[in-house]
Structures are given as C-alpha cells and as structure tokens.
C-alpha cells in the first residue's frame, strides 16, 4: 500500500524517526519537524506532526520504575542515554522521561501534575536536571534534593541559515532591524537570562532593550512558546534569521542531522558557559533507581554519550 492516500491527500509515515503530512511544505521542510528521537519499539506507531506529535514525553508513562525530568535542551541525548542505562541496569526497563523547559518542570513539581492537551500526568520525578545555579536556587527555596552531581557544561552560540545570508558576525548584529531573531522566552527559560547578559556585554543595555523590547513589539524578535528547540526549526523554515542557542543545539542540527544551518561563535568575553546538575529528589518514588541513575550520569559511559552530542565535561 502506498504511504500516501489519494482519498485525503495526506501522507503518513509510520516507521522511522517521524511521521509527516504531505501537505506541509514538502518533504524537505517536513523532515525538520520533531520528534527527532526514534519511537519506542512495539505497539501501533502513530504521529502526524504538527497535528498529533509528542516530542518531549519519552518512554513508559504507566508504572515507571524511574522518572527523570530533563532540562529540555538535552532531548537529543535521551534515547542513547536511557538505552545505555537500561543495558547497565537491566532491572529498570520502564523509564519515563520529560524534556520540557526547566521553568515548566519546576511548576509541574510544585503543582503535582502536567496537563498537555487532553492528557494529565501526575508522576513525581526521581531525578531533576537543570543548570547548576537553578538547582541551587530550588534547593534554597524548597529543599527538594537529597543529592546532586554535575555532569556537563555548554556555552552559547548563534544559529543561522547555511551560508549566513544575513552576514551575522556576533550578538550585536541581532539588534539590526533587518534581522529576525528567535529568542528563548525569559518566562520559563533560564538560558534567556544568560543570553541577555551576553547582549549587555556586546552592546550594553541599549542592545538588550532593542532585541528584547523594541523588536519583540514590532515582531522581529520571536519569543519561543515551547523551548529553545523551537528556534532551530524557525531558522530551518526561514521564519527567523538568527537564534542564540546552546552550542549543542547548533552542533546537533549541523553535525548530527546535517541540516542546512551554520554556527556563529560568540567570543568568550560575551559568552556564558552553563554547568548542568542532576539532582535526586528527597521524595523520589524509586529511591534506589534514582541513586543508580545519578551515579550513572557521571560514569564514563554517560559522559561519552554527552560528548557525542557536543556537550563539554562537567569540569573545564
């Protein structure tokens, strides 16, 4: 049977990395749509981006033996990391993972559940990962964590279309009227504060104001609605010209997926390098699994997976 139905003009690909609708700007554009992780084996596979697709919920949601809330910028690592953990600890096979914005994950923990569309998820995490400073602040505010471990670092970069048609040379160029910027939303993305610090280093308060106020008002700065994974998609689809992102986002799109994008480096004096920390929850439903996973995150095997996707070691 042909994957394209002549009756309704839609095309559904049920195998492989994702399924797409034929009418979405052609196959080359549709291929950019998440999810980019392969689906779990078994069962009926159904995904029709952008109408019916779940990119940030991974694994087994029913009676998980381990639940991990990852800061969303690590979505590309999840498949390899969880697969390696299952091989090392075969007693844990039902694992549920979320890769949502850190601010959303914190609110989910505070309220006790996440509502996504028509679905309500009331699972407590065993592990939360976030920036080191954010984990310290959450511990100060709530005392949530029993133990923590640093496991990776990540600097910032600017993602542009292949060939850099707007001739972006640095953060200062993002203030130009002709440059459409995709910017992480400060409401729930910690990276936004660090990017804004870079703006102020590159062009003072005037540059930060231009990008985050004036250009937001005139529509030439777009604030993401999901998380900064949305920014590469906008660059690929031509709706944004430049996107400040974690360097691993640019690396993943350019080096792993071989997408038509390029990376503009940010000089060290304007850049920020984040340290990522995994924290074991005090009220973790699966205490031993949480301890095993926290230890695994700093193991040579897990570190090699993070290096594969462009992350730096936790210590310089």
Image (cartoon, helix red, strand yellow):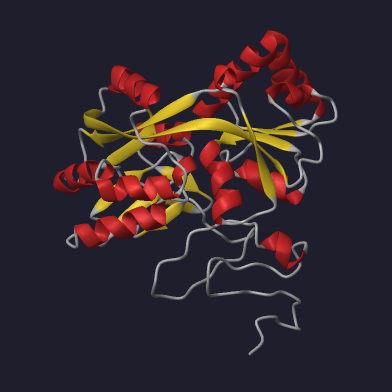
Position above or below: 213 against 308: above
Position above or below: 237 against 209: below
The answer to whether 64 appears left or right of 18 in the picture is left
Position above or below: 172 against 265: above
State the residue lying farthest toward the left: 288
Q: Can residue 168 be seen in this view?
A: yes
In the picture, residue 35 is in which quadrant?
bottom right
Q: Which residue does the image show at 81% across and 41% down from the upper left?
A: 165
The residue nearer to you, when weighing 94 against 130, is 130
Q: Where is residue 198 in the image (x, y as percent from the top left)?
A: 60, 19
The residue nearer to you, when weighing 61 against 197, is 197
In the picture, residue 128 is in which quadrant?
top left
State the residue lying farthest toward the right: 178
Q: Position of residue 126 (x, y in %)?
A: 26, 42
Q: The N terminus appears in which quarter of the rendering?
A: bottom right
Q: Where is residue 309 in the image (x, y as percent from the top left)?
A: 46, 48
Position above or below: 92 against 302: below
The total number of labels drawn is: 0
Q: Which residue does the image show at 55% across and 45% down from the upper left?
A: 251
Q: The C terminus appears in which quarter of the rendering?
A: top left
State the residue lying farthest toward the bottom: 1
Q: Which residue does the image show at 76% across and 25% down from the upper left?
A: 173
Q: Is residue 62 visible?
A: no
In the picture, residue 140 is in which quadrant?
top left
The answer to whether 296 appears left or right of 71 in the picture is left
């Amino acid at each position: 049977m042909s994957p394209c139905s002549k009756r309704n003009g839609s095309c559904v690909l049920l195998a492989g990395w994702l399924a797409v609708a034929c009418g979405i700007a052609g196959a080359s554009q549709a291929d950019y749509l998440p999810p980019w992780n392969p689906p779990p084996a078994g069962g009926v596979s159904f995904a029709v981006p952008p109408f019916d697709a779940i990119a940030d919920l991974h694994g087994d949601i029913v009676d998980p033996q381990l639940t991990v809330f990852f800061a969303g910028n690590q979505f590309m690592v999840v498949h390899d990391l969880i697969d390696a953990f299952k091989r090392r600890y075969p007693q844990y096979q039902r694992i549920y993972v979320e890769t949502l914005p850190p601010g959303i994950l914190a609110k989910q923990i505070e309220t006790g559940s996440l509502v996504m569309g028509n679905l309500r998820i009331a699972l407590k995490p065993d592990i939360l990962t976030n920036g080191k400073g954010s984990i310290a602040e959450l511990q100060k505010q709530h005392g949530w964590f029993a133990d923590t471990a640093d496991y990776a670092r990540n600097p910032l970069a600017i993602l542009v279309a292949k060939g850099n048609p707007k001739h972006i040379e640095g953060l200062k160029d993002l203030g130009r009227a002709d440059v459409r910027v995709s910017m992480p939303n400060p409401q729930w993305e910690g990276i936004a504060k660090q990017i804004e610090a870079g703006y102020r280093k590159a062009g003072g308060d005037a540059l930060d104001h231009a990008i985050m106020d004036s250009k937001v008002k005139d529509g030439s700065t777009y604030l993401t609605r999901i998380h900064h994974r949305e920014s590469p998609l906008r660059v690929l689809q031509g709706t944004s010209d430049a996107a400040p992102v974690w360097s691993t986002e640019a690396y993943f799109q350019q080096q792993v997926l071989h997408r038509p994008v390029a990376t503009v480096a940010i000089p060290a004096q304007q850049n920020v390098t984040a340290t990522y920390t995994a924290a074991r929850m005090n009220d973790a439903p699966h205490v031993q699994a949480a301890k095993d996973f926290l230890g695994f995150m700093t193991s040579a095997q897990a570190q090699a997976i993070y290096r594969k996707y462009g992350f730096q070691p936790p210590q310089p």
